[in-house]
Image: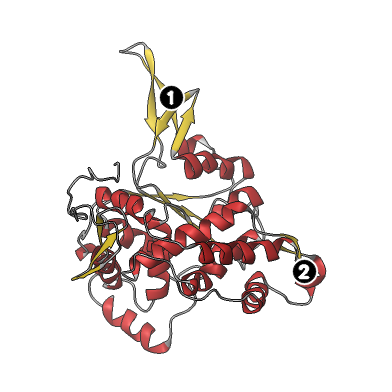
Amino acid sequence: MVLDDQAIISPVYVKAGLNLEPISLGKGLVNILGGTILDFKLCERIVENISQVIVGKHHTIELLLVALLGDGHVLLEDVPGLGKTLIAKSLARSIGGSFKRVQFTPDLLPADITGFNVYNQQKGQFTYQPGPVITNILLADEINRTIPRTQASLLESMEERQVTVDGQTFLLPHPFFVMATQNPIELEGTFPLPEAQLDRFLLKIHLGYPEKDEEISILERFREDDPLLKLEAVASPEQITELQQVRKKIRISLPVREYIADIVRVTRNNNSLRLGASPRGSLGLMRTGQALAALKGRDYVLPDDIKYLVGPVLAHRLILKEEERLRGGTPEHLLDEIVSQIPVPAPT
Protein backbone atom coordinates (compact mmCIF):
# COMPACT_ATOMS: atom_id res chain seq x y z
CA MET A 1 0.00 0.00 0.00
CA VAL A 2 1.40 3.41 -0.99
CA LEU A 3 1.16 5.88 1.87
CA ASP A 4 0.92 9.28 0.21
CA ASP A 5 -1.78 11.83 -0.46
CA GLN A 6 -3.72 9.12 -2.29
CA ALA A 7 -3.76 6.77 0.72
CA ILE A 8 -6.66 4.34 0.65
CA ILE A 9 -9.39 4.78 3.27
CA SER A 10 -9.48 1.66 5.46
CA PRO A 11 -10.65 0.62 8.94
CA VAL A 12 -7.25 1.77 10.22
CA TYR A 13 -6.73 5.04 8.35
CA VAL A 14 -8.82 7.98 7.23
CA LYS A 15 -7.67 10.97 5.24
CA ALA A 16 -6.72 14.13 7.05
CA GLY A 17 -6.49 16.43 4.07
CA LEU A 18 -3.13 18.00 3.29
CA ASN A 19 -2.22 19.21 6.78
CA LEU A 20 1.47 18.33 7.12
CA GLU A 21 1.77 19.15 10.83
CA PRO A 22 1.43 16.20 13.22
CA ILE A 23 -1.51 16.79 15.57
CA SER A 24 -3.34 14.83 18.23
CA LEU A 25 -6.95 14.18 17.27
CA GLY A 26 -8.20 12.40 20.38
CA LYS A 27 -10.32 9.25 20.55
CA GLY A 28 -7.35 7.10 19.66
CA LEU A 29 -6.39 8.83 16.42
CA VAL A 30 -3.02 10.41 15.70
CA ASN A 31 -2.25 12.30 12.49
CA ILE A 32 1.05 11.10 11.04
CA LEU A 33 3.16 13.52 9.00
CA GLY A 34 1.83 13.43 5.47
CA GLY A 35 -1.88 13.21 6.25
CA THR A 36 -2.41 9.58 7.30
CA ILE A 37 -4.18 8.91 10.58
CA LEU A 38 -3.16 5.99 12.76
CA ASP A 39 -5.83 4.35 14.91
CA PHE A 40 -3.50 3.31 17.71
CA LYS A 41 -6.50 2.12 19.76
CA LEU A 42 -6.38 -0.96 17.54
CA CYS A 43 -3.07 -1.86 19.20
CA GLU A 44 -4.60 -1.37 22.64
CA ARG A 45 -7.49 -3.66 21.71
CA ILE A 46 -5.05 -6.37 20.64
CA VAL A 47 -3.16 -6.10 23.95
CA GLU A 48 -6.41 -6.24 25.93
CA ASN A 49 -7.63 -9.19 23.89
CA ILE A 50 -4.48 -11.24 24.49
CA SER A 51 -4.65 -10.32 28.19
CA GLN A 52 -7.95 -12.21 28.41
CA VAL A 53 -5.84 -15.37 28.10
CA ILE A 54 -2.37 -14.37 29.32
CA VAL A 55 -2.12 -13.22 32.94
CA GLY A 56 0.34 -10.58 34.12
CA LYS A 57 2.54 -10.35 31.02
CA HIS A 58 1.57 -6.90 29.75
CA HIS A 59 5.24 -5.99 29.21
CA THR A 60 5.80 -9.13 27.11
CA ILE A 61 2.63 -8.64 25.07
CA GLU A 62 3.57 -5.03 24.42
CA LEU A 63 7.03 -6.04 23.20
CA LEU A 64 5.51 -8.69 20.92
CA LEU A 65 3.33 -6.03 19.30
CA VAL A 66 6.34 -3.73 19.02
CA ALA A 67 8.17 -6.46 17.11
CA LEU A 68 5.12 -7.17 14.95
CA LEU A 69 4.62 -3.50 14.02
CA GLY A 70 8.37 -3.21 13.52
CA ASP A 71 8.09 -5.99 10.91
CA GLY A 72 10.56 -8.14 12.82
CA HIS A 73 10.75 -11.42 14.72
CA VAL A 74 11.08 -12.42 18.37
CA LEU A 75 13.23 -14.90 20.27
CA LEU A 76 11.57 -16.02 23.52
CA GLU A 77 14.11 -17.48 25.91
CA ASP A 78 12.89 -19.15 29.08
CA VAL A 79 12.17 -22.47 30.75
CA PRO A 80 9.22 -24.62 29.58
CA GLY A 81 5.70 -24.12 30.86
CA LEU A 82 5.55 -20.32 31.00
CA GLY A 83 3.02 -19.89 28.19
CA LYS A 84 5.16 -19.21 25.13
CA THR A 85 2.93 -21.29 22.84
CA LEU A 86 -0.21 -19.82 24.39
CA ILE A 87 1.00 -16.27 23.75
CA ALA A 88 1.73 -17.10 20.10
CA LYS A 89 -1.71 -18.67 19.59
CA SER A 90 -3.43 -15.76 21.33
CA LEU A 91 -1.64 -13.24 19.11
CA ALA A 92 -2.57 -15.16 15.96
CA ARG A 93 -6.24 -15.33 16.99
CA SER A 94 -6.32 -11.66 17.96
CA ILE A 95 -5.16 -10.51 14.51
CA GLY A 96 -7.25 -13.10 12.67
CA GLY A 97 -4.12 -14.63 11.18
CA SER A 98 -3.02 -18.17 10.43
CA PHE A 99 -0.82 -20.00 12.93
CA LYS A 100 1.64 -22.86 12.51
CA ARG A 101 3.88 -24.52 15.09
CA VAL A 102 7.05 -26.47 14.31
CA GLN A 103 8.71 -28.56 17.01
CA PHE A 104 12.42 -28.34 16.23
CA THR A 105 14.19 -31.67 16.74
CA PRO A 106 17.62 -32.99 15.68
CA ASP A 107 16.10 -34.92 12.75
CA LEU A 108 14.10 -31.98 11.37
CA LEU A 109 15.00 -31.16 7.74
CA PRO A 110 14.83 -27.80 5.92
CA ALA A 111 12.06 -29.17 3.67
CA ASP A 112 9.97 -29.84 6.79
CA ILE A 113 9.82 -26.07 7.23
CA THR A 114 9.93 -24.57 3.74
CA GLY A 115 7.94 -27.26 1.92
CA PHE A 116 8.93 -29.38 -1.07
CA ASN A 117 7.97 -30.32 -4.63
CA VAL A 118 5.87 -33.44 -5.22
CA TYR A 119 5.48 -35.10 -8.61
CA ASN A 120 1.87 -34.97 -9.79
CA GLN A 121 1.28 -37.97 -12.06
CA GLN A 122 -1.99 -36.61 -13.44
CA LYS A 123 -0.43 -33.30 -14.52
CA GLY A 124 2.95 -34.83 -15.33
CA GLN A 125 4.80 -32.13 -13.41
CA PHE A 126 6.06 -31.22 -9.96
CA THR A 127 3.82 -29.15 -7.71
CA TYR A 128 4.82 -27.26 -4.60
CA GLN A 129 3.62 -28.66 -1.29
CA PRO A 130 3.73 -25.68 1.11
CA GLY A 131 5.50 -26.08 4.42
CA PRO A 132 4.45 -24.59 7.77
CA VAL A 133 6.43 -21.43 6.99
CA ILE A 134 3.52 -20.35 4.75
CA THR A 135 1.60 -18.68 7.57
CA ASN A 136 1.18 -15.38 9.41
CA ILE A 137 2.49 -16.47 12.82
CA LEU A 138 5.13 -19.21 12.94
CA LEU A 139 6.13 -20.66 16.31
CA ALA A 140 9.59 -22.22 16.01
CA ASP A 141 9.55 -24.20 19.25
CA GLU A 142 12.94 -25.01 20.81
CA ILE A 143 14.77 -23.76 17.75
CA ASN A 144 18.17 -24.58 19.27
CA ARG A 145 17.42 -28.33 19.28
CA THR A 146 17.81 -28.75 15.53
CA ILE A 147 20.93 -28.78 13.36
CA PRO A 148 22.38 -25.50 11.99
CA ARG A 149 21.42 -26.42 8.41
CA THR A 150 17.75 -26.53 9.38
CA GLN A 151 18.04 -23.39 11.49
CA ALA A 152 19.52 -21.61 8.48
CA SER A 153 16.50 -22.56 6.36
CA LEU A 154 14.58 -19.88 8.24
CA LEU A 155 17.06 -17.12 7.36
CA GLU A 156 15.69 -16.34 3.91
CA SER A 157 12.11 -16.41 5.17
CA MET A 158 12.83 -14.11 8.11
CA GLU A 159 14.82 -11.57 6.13
CA GLU A 160 13.20 -11.57 2.68
CA ARG A 161 9.67 -12.88 3.38
CA GLN A 162 10.02 -15.61 0.79
CA VAL A 163 11.11 -19.24 0.40
CA THR A 164 13.02 -20.81 -2.46
CA VAL A 165 12.44 -24.48 -3.26
CA ASP A 166 14.23 -26.12 -6.21
CA GLY A 167 14.91 -22.74 -7.77
CA GLN A 168 11.32 -21.52 -7.42
CA THR A 169 10.57 -18.57 -5.16
CA PHE A 170 7.32 -18.31 -3.21
CA LEU A 171 6.27 -15.16 -1.37
CA LEU A 172 5.09 -15.45 2.22
CA PRO A 173 1.78 -13.97 3.41
CA HIS A 174 1.69 -10.59 5.15
CA PRO A 175 2.27 -10.14 7.96
CA PHE A 176 4.88 -12.87 8.55
CA PHE A 177 6.06 -13.11 12.14
CA VAL A 178 8.40 -15.73 13.63
CA MET A 179 8.32 -16.42 17.36
CA ALA A 180 11.20 -18.75 18.21
CA THR A 181 11.68 -20.28 21.65
CA GLN A 182 14.67 -21.78 23.36
CA ASN A 183 15.41 -23.14 26.83
CA PRO A 184 18.51 -21.48 28.36
CA ILE A 185 18.90 -24.17 31.04
CA GLU A 186 19.14 -27.40 29.04
CA LEU A 187 22.29 -27.26 26.92
CA GLU A 188 22.79 -30.98 26.23
CA GLY A 189 21.73 -31.93 22.71
CA THR A 190 21.33 -28.32 21.59
CA PHE A 191 22.88 -26.30 18.77
CA PRO A 192 23.43 -22.63 19.72
CA LEU A 193 22.05 -20.21 17.16
CA PRO A 194 24.83 -18.63 15.05
CA GLU A 195 25.36 -14.88 15.29
CA ALA A 196 23.95 -14.36 11.79
CA GLN A 197 20.62 -15.85 12.80
CA LEU A 198 20.50 -14.20 16.23
CA ASP A 199 20.91 -10.88 14.45
CA ARG A 200 17.76 -11.61 12.42
CA PHE A 201 15.61 -11.44 15.57
CA LEU A 202 14.40 -7.93 16.26
CA LEU A 203 13.85 -8.64 19.96
CA LYS A 204 14.83 -11.19 22.56
CA ILE A 205 12.37 -11.50 25.44
CA HIS A 206 12.49 -13.30 28.79
CA LEU A 207 9.09 -14.24 30.23
CA GLY A 208 9.88 -15.07 33.86
CA TYR A 209 7.72 -16.79 36.45
CA PRO A 210 4.39 -15.21 37.46
CA GLU A 211 3.88 -13.55 40.84
CA LYS A 212 1.78 -15.37 43.44
CA ASP A 213 -1.41 -13.38 42.75
CA GLU A 214 -0.90 -13.86 39.01
CA GLU A 215 -0.53 -17.61 39.45
CA ILE A 216 -3.76 -17.71 41.47
CA SER A 217 -5.47 -15.83 38.63
CA ILE A 218 -4.10 -18.37 36.14
CA LEU A 219 -5.57 -21.22 38.18
CA GLU A 220 -8.94 -19.50 38.29
CA ARG A 221 -8.94 -18.54 34.61
CA PHE A 222 -8.17 -22.08 33.46
CA ARG A 223 -10.23 -23.85 36.14
CA GLU A 224 -13.02 -24.90 33.79
CA ASP A 225 -12.58 -23.82 30.18
CA ASP A 226 -9.62 -22.80 28.06
CA PRO A 227 -10.09 -19.02 27.48
CA LEU A 228 -8.17 -19.33 24.21
CA LEU A 229 -11.13 -21.17 22.67
CA LYS A 230 -13.35 -18.12 23.24
CA LEU A 231 -10.85 -15.58 21.97
CA GLU A 232 -12.05 -13.69 18.89
CA ALA A 233 -10.18 -11.55 16.39
CA VAL A 234 -10.11 -7.79 17.00
CA ALA A 235 -8.01 -7.01 13.92
CA SER A 236 -7.16 -8.48 10.53
CA PRO A 237 -3.84 -9.36 8.87
CA GLU A 238 -4.50 -6.58 6.36
CA GLN A 239 -4.84 -4.02 9.16
CA ILE A 240 -1.58 -5.18 10.73
CA THR A 241 0.19 -4.87 7.38
CA GLU A 242 -1.14 -1.34 7.00
CA LEU A 243 -0.03 -0.47 10.53
CA GLN A 244 3.46 -1.71 9.67
CA GLN A 245 3.55 0.73 6.77
CA VAL A 246 2.22 3.66 8.78
CA ARG A 247 4.74 2.93 11.54
CA LYS A 248 7.45 4.04 9.11
CA LYS A 249 5.93 7.54 9.14
CA ILE A 250 6.37 7.99 12.90
CA ARG A 251 8.81 10.90 13.34
CA ILE A 252 12.24 10.21 14.81
CA SER A 253 14.26 13.41 15.20
CA LEU A 254 17.96 13.82 14.44
CA PRO A 255 18.93 14.01 18.16
CA VAL A 256 17.18 10.69 18.81
CA ARG A 257 18.86 9.12 15.79
CA GLU A 258 22.21 10.39 17.07
CA TYR A 259 21.36 8.90 20.48
CA ILE A 260 20.83 5.50 18.84
CA ALA A 261 24.13 5.78 16.97
CA ASP A 262 26.00 6.74 20.16
CA ILE A 263 24.69 3.70 22.04
CA VAL A 264 25.53 1.28 19.25
CA ARG A 265 28.99 2.73 18.62
CA VAL A 266 29.97 2.33 22.28
CA THR A 267 29.19 -1.41 22.08
CA ARG A 268 31.71 -1.72 19.24
CA ASN A 269 34.53 -0.18 21.26
CA ASN A 270 33.84 -1.73 24.65
CA ASN A 271 36.66 -3.64 26.35
CA SER A 272 34.20 -6.19 27.77
CA LEU A 273 32.75 -7.16 24.39
CA ARG A 274 34.12 -9.40 21.69
CA LEU A 275 31.31 -8.43 19.29
CA GLY A 276 29.25 -5.25 19.33
CA ALA A 277 25.97 -4.39 17.66
CA SER A 278 25.79 -4.17 13.87
CA PRO A 279 23.92 -1.50 11.85
CA ARG A 280 21.00 -3.95 11.89
CA GLY A 281 20.87 -3.29 15.62
CA SER A 282 20.68 0.47 14.98
CA LEU A 283 17.84 -0.06 12.52
CA GLY A 284 16.15 -2.33 15.05
CA LEU A 285 16.19 0.41 17.69
CA MET A 286 14.72 2.90 15.22
CA ARG A 287 11.95 0.55 14.04
CA THR A 288 10.99 -0.58 17.53
CA GLY A 289 11.11 3.00 18.79
CA GLN A 290 8.62 4.01 16.09
CA ALA A 291 6.42 1.02 16.91
CA LEU A 292 6.44 1.75 20.65
CA ALA A 293 5.56 5.38 19.99
CA ALA A 294 2.56 4.22 17.94
CA LEU A 295 1.47 1.89 20.76
CA LYS A 296 1.68 4.81 23.19
CA GLY A 297 -0.40 7.01 20.92
CA ARG A 298 2.38 9.33 19.77
CA ASP A 299 3.50 10.34 16.29
CA TYR A 300 7.10 10.88 17.42
CA VAL A 301 9.82 8.85 19.17
CA LEU A 302 11.18 9.89 22.57
CA PRO A 303 14.66 9.09 23.93
CA ASP A 304 12.90 7.17 26.72
CA ASP A 305 11.44 4.84 24.08
CA ILE A 306 14.96 3.96 22.98
CA LYS A 307 16.20 3.49 26.57
CA TYR A 308 13.29 1.13 27.25
CA LEU A 309 14.12 -0.97 24.18
CA VAL A 310 17.93 -1.11 24.31
CA GLY A 311 18.06 -4.39 26.27
CA PRO A 312 15.50 -6.40 24.26
CA VAL A 313 16.86 -5.12 20.92
CA LEU A 314 20.63 -5.29 21.47
CA ALA A 315 21.47 -7.80 24.23
CA HIS A 316 21.28 -10.91 22.04
CA ARG A 317 23.50 -9.27 19.40
CA LEU A 318 26.44 -8.81 21.77
CA ILE A 319 29.13 -11.37 22.63
CA LEU A 320 30.99 -10.95 25.91
CA LYS A 321 34.69 -11.59 26.23
CA GLU A 322 35.45 -14.75 28.18
CA GLU A 323 36.91 -12.93 31.18
CA GLU A 324 33.80 -10.74 31.46
CA ARG A 325 31.53 -13.76 31.27
CA LEU A 326 33.55 -15.54 34.00
CA ARG A 327 33.13 -12.47 36.21
CA GLY A 328 29.38 -12.97 35.94
CA GLY A 329 28.74 -10.16 33.50
CA THR A 330 25.75 -10.17 31.16
CA PRO A 331 24.98 -8.15 28.02
CA GLU A 332 21.93 -6.69 29.77
CA HIS A 333 23.97 -5.30 32.69
CA LEU A 334 26.62 -3.99 30.32
CA LEU A 335 23.98 -2.18 28.25
CA ASP A 336 22.56 -0.62 31.42
CA GLU A 337 26.02 0.79 32.17
CA ILE A 338 26.45 2.07 28.62
CA VAL A 339 23.06 3.78 28.54
CA SER A 340 23.67 5.41 31.94
CA GLN A 341 26.85 7.04 30.62
CA ILE A 342 25.44 8.48 27.38
CA PRO A 343 23.76 11.91 27.61
CA VAL A 344 20.05 11.79 26.83
CA PRO A 345 19.02 14.35 24.19
CA ALA A 346 16.58 17.02 25.28
CA PRO A 347 13.04 16.85 23.81
CA THR A 348 12.66 18.88 20.63
Q: Name the side, left or right, on which 19 lies relative to 298.
A: left
Badge 2: residue crowd in 10 Å (few <14, some 14–19, many ≥20): many
Q: Which of the pair 11/322 is nearer the observer?
A: 11
Q: Position of residue 78 (x, y in %)?
A: 53, 68
Q: Is residue 75 visible?
A: no
**Dot 1 lies on which element?**
strand
Q: Secondary structure at mark 2?
A: loop
**Residue displayed at 20% across by 45% down:** 8
Quadrant of the image occupied by residue 341: bottom right
Tell me the amino acid under the disc marked 2: Ser
Q: Which residue is mark 1?
A: 117
Identify the image's colour scheme: rainbow, by chain, secondary structure or one colour: secondary structure
Q: Nearer the viewer, mark 1 or mark 2?
A: 2
Residue 60 on image: x %, y %: 42, 70
Residue 274, image x, y percentages: 76, 60
With respect to residue 224, does 316 lie above or below? above
Pointer 2 residue: 272
Q: Is residue 282 visible?
A: yes
- Residue 198 in the figure: left or right of residue 88: right
Quadrant including the C terminus: bottom left
Task: Farthest residue to the bottom: give it.
Answer: 213
| Mark 1 to mark 2 CA distance (whole Å) | 48 Å
Name which of mark 1 and mark 2 comes first in the sequence.
Answer: 1
Pointers 1 and 2 in contact (C-beta within 8 Å): no
Residue lying at the far top in this picture: please name it.
124
Amino acid type at mark 1: Asn
Q: Looking at this view, name the residue that lies furthest to the right.
A: 323
In the figure, is residue 274 to the left or right of 4? Answer: right
